[in-house]
Image (cartoon, helix red, strand yellow):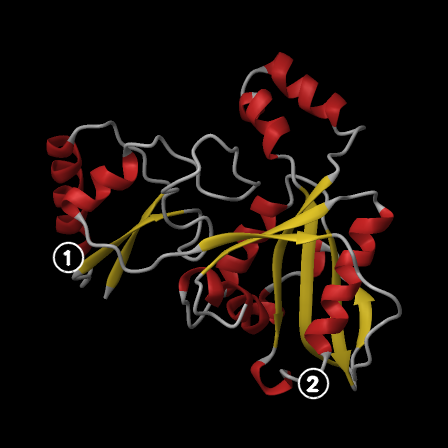
Amino acid sequence: GTAYLGLLRCANDEETLERLLGTALEAASERGCTRLIGPVGVIPAWESGALANQFHVLPPLHTPYNPPYLPDLLASVMAPVQETALYELPARPGEGSPAGPAKLEPLTLSHVDASLAPLVAAALTPHAGVDDVAGHEVEVLRKWIGAWPAAGWLAKVDGEAVGFVLAQPDTAALMHRARGGRRLPLRLYSLWARRRPPTHGRLLLGAVAPLWRRRGIGAQLLHQVLRHAQEERGTGLACGPYAPDSAA
């Protein structure tokens, strides 16, 4: 089995990291796990990995951000298993709605639950190559994302949910200035700043069920989220990080 290093933080010291990983692997082996994968976020397929370049640019919300020394430090005691990349999507939906078989309905975070776990797993696969997502992981992810308002749409064909998309304002710069809102004055500042949402967005998750792909449903969802970004006077959407060889 595999154990995951969630929310890993470490100083720039190889010996300390080796001792930490040794202790973690010993504990994991007692549960039948033979390898460690990390860093990951609150669930294995979310906010996984370490930023390896472009340190002068603040990454978008829900993206790993770490000191420049971390990739080399991790490489000294661990082996990389996957590389991912961030992408930028201009908020230009194009003229007219694309043809497709699905009916799009508004989707709120409160309705992102265990019943959508297969679609959530499909959405997370380009991030970390997961095969399955447990119901409780969907709940944790929903609460994590729900710290800020999100907009979403669910694609249905004959009443069956076959795809979805979620987006929200990219508040990375605000959270950086407010230091995550850990102190009361900065928390109050972040609440005040919500009245002036950023002009840049974050494409959080999106997927179409495997049996319904290549029928125009993804284009329907993408057009809808880009139109929403344009209506909110957004300039674009940050997407990913995705594995370059993934369908996304």
Where is residue 182 shown, x and y percent of the image? 54, 21
Query: Which label is found at residue 29?
Result: 1
User: Within 10 Å of the Cα at label 1, are there few (<14), some (14-19), or many (20+) other Cα atoms?
Assistant: some
User: Within 10 Å of the Cα at label 2, are there few (<14), some (14-19), or many (20+) other Cα atoms?
Assistant: some
Left/right of residue 196 with respect to residue 121 in the rendered view? right
Residue tagged by mark 2?
A: 215
Q: Quadrant of residue 191?
A: top right
Q: Which of 204 and 35 lies nearest the eye of the viewer?
A: 204
Tell me whether the residue at label 1 lies in contact with that at label 2, contact meaning CB atoms closer than 8 angstroms. no
Where is residue 63 shown, x and y percent of the image? 49, 44
> What residue occupies the far top of the structure in this picture?
185
Which one is in front in this view, the residue at disc 1 or the one at disc 2? 2
Query: Residue at coordinates 58% horizontally, 71% vertically from top-left?
Result: 119
Quadrant location of the C terminus in the rendered image:
bottom right
Where is residue 42 shown, x and y percent of the image? 44, 47
Query: Which label is found at residue 199?
Result: none
Q: CA distance from mark 1 to mark 2?
A: 45 Å
Left/right of residue 221 with respect to residue 209 in the rendered view? right
Q: Which of 22 and 198 lies nearest the eye of the viewer?
A: 198
Amino acid type, callout 1? Ser
Q: Quadrant of residue 24?
A: top left
Quadrant location of the N terminus in the rendered image:
bottom left
Report how many numbered discs are placed on residues in the image. 2
Q: Secondary structure at mark 1?
A: helix
Amino acid type, callout 2? Arg
Q: Which of 208 and 238 lies nearest the eye of the viewer?
A: 238
Query: Residue at coordinates 54% horizontally, 59% vertically from top-left?
Result: 138
